[in-house]
Amino acid sequence: MSHFPTMKVFVASAWPYVETVPHLGNLIGSVLSADVFARYARLKYGKENVIFVSGSDEHGTPIEIEAVKRKVSPKALTDQAHEYVKDLFLNVWKISYDNYTRTESETHKKFVREFILGLKDYVFVQEETLPYCENDKMFLPDRFVKGTCPYCGFEDARGDQCDRCGRLLSPEILINPRCAICGAKPVFKKTKHWFFDLSKFQDRIREWLERNKEMPENVKAVALSWISEGLKPRSLTRDNSWGIPAPFEGAEGKTIYVWFEALLGYISATIEYFEKKGNPKGWEDFWLDDAKSYYFIGKDNIPFHAVIFPAMLMASGKSYSLPTVISSTEYLLYEGQKFSKSRRIGIWIDEAPKVMDVDYWRFVLIRLRPEERDTSFLWKEALRIINSELNDDIGNFVNRSITMVNRYNESKVPPLDESKLDEVDLKLLKAMNETPDAVSEYFEKGKLKAGTEEILRLAREGNAYLNAKAPWDLVKKDKAMAMNVLAITMGVVRSLAIMLYAVIPTSSQRIYDQLSLGSIEDEKWDNAKKLIPAGHVVGKASPVFRKLPEDFEAQVPKLLEKVRSELEKTRPPLLR
RNA sequence: AGCGGCGUAGGCCAGCCUGGUAGGCCGCAGGGCUCAUAACCCUGAGGUCCCUGGUUCAAGUCCAGGCGCCGCUACCA
């Protein structure tokens, strides 16, 4: 691993669409994964070299429709949603955003308009005929037109696809079309749209993807197959009123298609962060030089990040850095089923922290991160991960190590007598020296679950080492050797704390408190390879984690019911 | 329908790209230890690696076909 210490690292999570409160699947897919990486990167490359941003994606039809239904303005809806979600991320889930902003931010809107005007060589205008509801005074997206399927006669088919026979449809072929919002019959009206000609970038995107060695294979595969089907021009504008006004001449009343602008939020959020810091040029270090960039997204988002976004950056004519790693997750299922708001399947991010500790959730979610395939969140698994991995393997190792230093050396970390080292000692020292690099390598490929597996392995080796060495015996026979054991295990304890900080920051700090080592945020990743200096006095051992009772799973339904009825009162009114 | 993913011990999953005596954790059985959160460590039992055919000296790993499960399919973000 050769990395320059001054390298700039840009980290982003996909922007949550704040129509509703996100659920755990949304959280692990982007927000939490990105946070783990950002926290890791700060220790590894230095806080000042890392920036981590995201924001609420609040424009677009679904929110507009939701607002219409609730008889409020879209802005009123997203104001509430944004504040609620932001507070949950920052203060409850400890997501360490440097800037969590929103697409209604002035900096964003200004940047988007300027950026899109800069694409002019790749933009053209075309006229189309689209369904329009005169009652709701808006053009209707395909799926918001309902009617009878001309193939199977299903009466509740959507304009894009029939849910019964599965055929692809389009609004104009539906029999008795009606508006999905008010039920009125839509008319078909001519409208002009501005298109971004993606097809011009087909070859350049393909080359870039094929050359990029760090990009995960699954992302490449999906993106390349998309490209091989041929890239088509994509509409930049829509006839919605809720969004950023399109800046083109003659485009009055039209807004920018949300996907284009949401992606640009990555840049505008960086700009906004540095503007607020009074360093308006600072953002360039993260975008114009060869900064590395890591994006954490769900699998449905791959084409947008691996094809459309790079094409936009290329089309701008400026030397923006293209994504280094796009880490996409498959879907998290809840006990085998898809998360579903309407069917109440799953757990939402304001409910979860009331069920158990946030660090437990963070650890469990990363351990269950759907890196290779859809993965079920099973309470049985969650219990195993918390009780066996977090408590027994890690927590108990930390506790027994510190206890022994408390007891056998008056809480002082002993020096290492190298002349006394044997093979068993050397084996664990080697593991301690190698694990941080192995974890780094996995993390930097976006493989967070695999990285934590390495951390766990070190904890298990630590436990095996203690059993093999039995310092409680050794201390009576060969004090120097016993002291070596303590010196080494204390090193391993700190090593675990440093590596786990990214996943369970609060608990890691608690370990650091017991070690009297100050703030773990200011720690260096590479200290995970080093022993604690001899003579350092540690605090008193006390269990960092607590087990969940065996019957916890059985209690969950009742617990959730209670949590939900409380939230019915405390959630912002528009999100209930 | 098209595209993509997946199918490995009772459970969850790694290995498949770069073929060569089948791994990890949990659970289970037996043993050890007592510093520790009834923890930890060791040993063991348990698998036709979805099916069929092919390539190969050799296939969980490559190829073809089939079965099953899942996801995506672009103004739906």
Image (tube, coloured by chain):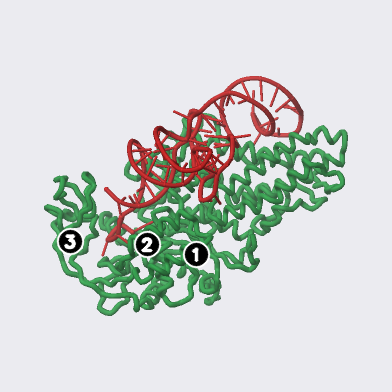
Chain colours: A green, B red
**Image mark 3: chain:** A
Three-letter amino acid code at disc 1?
Arg
Q: Badge 2, how many Cα within 10 Å: few under 14, some, many 20+?
A: some
**Image mark 1: chain:** A
**Image mark 2: chain:** A
Residue A358, numbered label:
none
Residue located at (73% from left, 40% from top): A401
Three-letter amino acid code at disc 2?
Ile
Q: Secondary structure at mark 1?
A: helix
Place of residue A442 in the rendered image (x, y in percent of width and height, measured from the top left):
58, 52
In this view, A404 is above or below A321: above
The answer to whether marks 2 and 1 sit on the same chain is yes
Q: Relative to residue A340, is residue A378 drawn left or right? A: right
Q: Secondary structure at mark 2?
A: helix
In this figure, which residue is indicated by the disc labeled 3?
A133
Residue A211, numbered label:
1
Q: Badge 3, how many Cα within 10 Å: few under 14, some, many 20+?
A: many
Residue located at (32% from left, 76% from top): A247
In three-dimensional space, the C-alpha distance between marks 1 and 3, rounded to whole angstroms, equals 47 Å
Q: In which quadrant of the rendered view does residue B52 lie?
A: top left
Place of residue A438 in the rendered image (x, y in percent of width and height, measured from the top left):
63, 51
In three-dimensional space, the C-alpha distance between marks 2 and 1, rounded to whole angstroms, equals 15 Å
First reached walking from the N terminus: tag 2 or tag 3: 3
In three-dimensional space, the C-alpha distance between marks 2 and 3, rounded to whole angstroms, equals 35 Å
Instruction: Please say if the residues under marks 1 and 3 sit with CB atoms less than 8 Å apart.
Output: no
Three-letter amino acid code at disc 3?
Cys
Would residue A529 be visible to someone looking at this image? Answer: yes
Place of residue A454 in the rendered image (x, y in percent of width and height, measured from the top left):
62, 46
Residue located at (62% from left, 51% from top): A439
Q: Secondary structure at mark 3?
A: strand
Instruction: Please say if the residues under marks 2 and 3 sit with CB atoms less than 8 Å apart.
Output: no
In this figure, which residue is indicated by the disc labeled 2?
A227
